[in-house]
Amino acid sequence: MLVVKKFGGTSVGNRDRIFNVANRCVEEYRRGNDVVVVLSAMGKYTDVLIEMAKEINENPPKREMDMLLTTGEQQSVALMAMAMASLGVPAVSLNAFQVAMHTTSVYSNARLKRIDAERIRAELEQRKIVIVTGFQGVNKYDDYTTLGRGGSDTTAVALAAALHADKCEIFTDVDGVYTADPRKVPTARKLDFVTYDEMLELATLGAGVLHNRSVELAKKYGVQLVVRSSLDMSEGTIVKGGHKMEKMIVSGVAADTDAARVAVIGLKDEPGVAFKLFNELAKKNINIDMILQSVGRHGTKDITFTCGDEAADEAEKIISEKMEFESIDVNKDVAKVSIVGAGMQSNAGVAAKMFEALYDANINIRMISTSEIRVTVLIDEKEAERAMNAIHDKFDLGDHR
Ligand code: ASP
Ligand code: MG
């Protein structure tokens, strides 16, 4: 059996934790399995590197930024290989260049295009544990790229797909996927399994457990994931296709405080305006989330949308340069709160129940958007935690033990 195991920063944050991971991998190896390990940078080291860069240059060139950030993962894989060697187990660390993980050219937000599996296979053939840097790739200019914050999950799933692994385990500092973030909602309950679609919505909405592109990839290639704790032996949450056995209408509540609302007032009410606006933003790689267009009046209309906090300033600048309008308003003190559940598709009244929970808690809704298995509201950021708890209670998602 071939197993891909991914460990996040906390799981390799210090010497003891590195040996804890090494031992877990060696155990798997001694059962006769092929083991590929994907690691993040130690602890919050990626943040440390970002700080270092900012001390030199407030606005560092993106290529150089990736050159710097990829060193974090290179440290952790090398140290892990040394730990395994000291345990008497043959191991080899490989970076994105050595594996050959090809990505698109966009620095800091590259996408994996193709992975050459030969080197890894050759090392496994010699009964080595192969330890691969997460988060990084190489583009067509032979430059390092990174996959976006939290991207090591995506590296792991892509490797599992490329190697046709039998198992892909994502080890983290929580023991699985919860109905809500347990730090914010004390009654949150661990889920035994979620579907790809639910996980995708939850990941995108800031549930924080998995990089959303890793779930997209897992779904595309049918890689079954297990999210579990690196610190204990609990079973974790399985992420897979198919339908839910337990007829849960709502599986989870998520909040994302990295949201900003941009309202553009008094745009011309004529064809092509929305296209022009969002096309200008797309050219600068600004990801838009919710969109609302008002009914036109006196030949003008308003368009309101949400994006990440950081993107909002850039969006404001681009719009001011490229568009004709009366005024623009940016509000970063907003948060998205969402409910997700595959069972929603076949049940009426789910959105109404969520809105009722917010009404009961006297929380004002500023925007609403939905998908087949999700309802999202935009509210004031300071209300986010209270909203999550109110909704979680309303749908009775908690642990009753
Ligand atoms: N080290 C990178 C980050 O902190 C990638 C990861 O941890 O997945 O974002
Ligand atoms: Mg992560």
Image: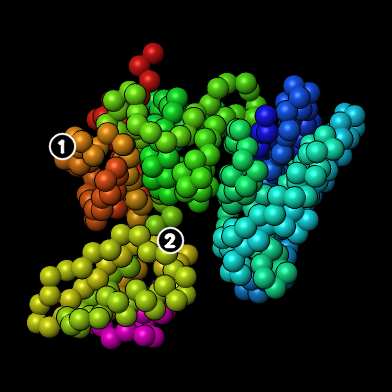
Percent x, y of residue 217: 51, 48
Q: Main secondary structure of the magenta part?
A: helix
**Where is mark 1, residue-wise?**
348
Which label was assigned to residue 267? none
In the picture, the quarter occupied by the C terminus is top left
Percent x, y of residue 321: 39, 85
Residue 151 in the figure: left or right of residue 138: left
Q: What kind of element bears circle 2?
A: loop
Residue extending furthest toward the left: 298
Q: Quadrant of residue 289?
A: bottom left
Q: What kind of element bears circle 1?
A: loop
Give the residue drawn at x 67%, y 29%.
Answer: 1
Q: Residues within 10 Å of mark 1 (few under 14, many from 20)?
A: few
Query: Is 389 a magenta residue?
Result: no
**Where is mark 2, residue-wise?**
308
Q: Quadrant of residue 233?
A: top right
Q: Residues within 10 Å of mark 2 (few under 14, many from 20)?
A: some
253 or 192: which is nearer to us? 192
Question: Is any atom of residue 96 visible in this view?
Answer: no
Q: Quadrant of residue 18?
A: top right
Give the residue drawn at x 35%, y 31%.
Answer: 243
Say if mark 2 contacts mark 1, CB within 8 Å: no
Over which residues does the magenta segment extend? 315-326
Pick whichever of labels 2 and 1 is earlier in the sequence. 2
Question: Can you tell me whether the CB of the residue at mark 2 lies under 8 Å from the nearest atom of ligand 1?
Answer: no
Q: How many marks?
A: 2
**134 is higher (above) or lower (below) than 286:** above
Mark 1: which amino acid?
Ala
Give the residue drawn at x 75%, y 21%.
Answer: 31
Question: Can you tell me whether the CB of the residue at mark 1 lies under 8 Å from the nearest atom of ligand 2?
Answer: no
